Amino acid sequence: MVLRATATGEVHGLVDTLTNSVEFNDFKHMDPKTKAKLEKEKKEDSILVKVEYMNRKGNHERLDKPYCRYAGDPILKYHLIPGQIYELPKGFVKEVNDMKQFKRAGLVSQDGNPVRKDESPLDQDVVADWEHRLVPAV
């Protein structure tokens, strides 16, 4: 594993790999149709894709996230910096891009800004804007 660092010494990208205490069982307890489907998904999720990390809040924010999609896989710990380009597993990219932010019912302001113009609280939970996004790198 080759570590990447910024000029100030901040290590980023894949920063650690941990062994998983769960044994890989090769999907042996599943019916053949489901087993074949999961084996295909596992193979596709492990493909490395080149992406750029973006954070809606700005370049000062970071994403620290462990990734372990299937039983027995090693636990990969990532530290991502906005504006940097990484080669990441497709499964990790899907997981990050599917993370949803919610504005909870009763919320009056967010980060000091009123949620509604009339400053009344929200009636129900709603999906908010994304915070973390991984986009294909050019």
Image (tube, rainbow, N blue to C red):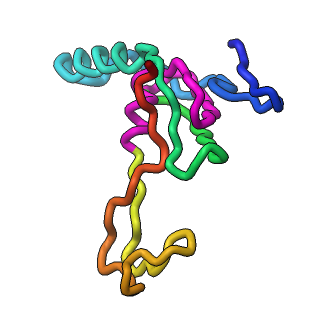
Classify residue 13 by image quadrant. top right
Residue 93 in the image: state x and y as whole percent. Answer: 43, 30
Residue at 57% from the left image edge and 32% from the top image edge: 83
Residue 84 in the image: state x and y as whole percent. Answer: 59, 28
Image position of 102 (left or right of 40): right
| 101 over 54 or under it: above or below | below
- Identify the residue at the far left of this view: 33
| 37 over 131 or under it: above or below | above
| Residue 82 covered by magenta stretch | yes
Question: Is residue 90 or residue 52 the one in the foreground?
Answer: 52
| 119 over 105 or under it: above or below | below
Image position of 31 (left or right of 78): left
Image position of 13 (left or right of 8): left
The quadrant of the image that shows the C terminus is top left
| Residue 105 covered by magenta stretch | no
Question: Is residue 80 or residue 38 the one in the foreground?
Answer: 80
Residue 108 in the image: state x and y as whole percent. Answer: 45, 81
Residue at 56% from the left image edge and 74% from the top image edge: 112
Instruction: Magenta stretch: give its range.
Output: 70-98
Image position of 119 (left or right of 29): right
* Residue 133, visible in the rendered structure: yes
Residue at 38% from the left image edge and 20% from the top image edge: 45
| 68 over 38 or under it: above or below | below
Classify residue 120 by image quadrant. bottom left
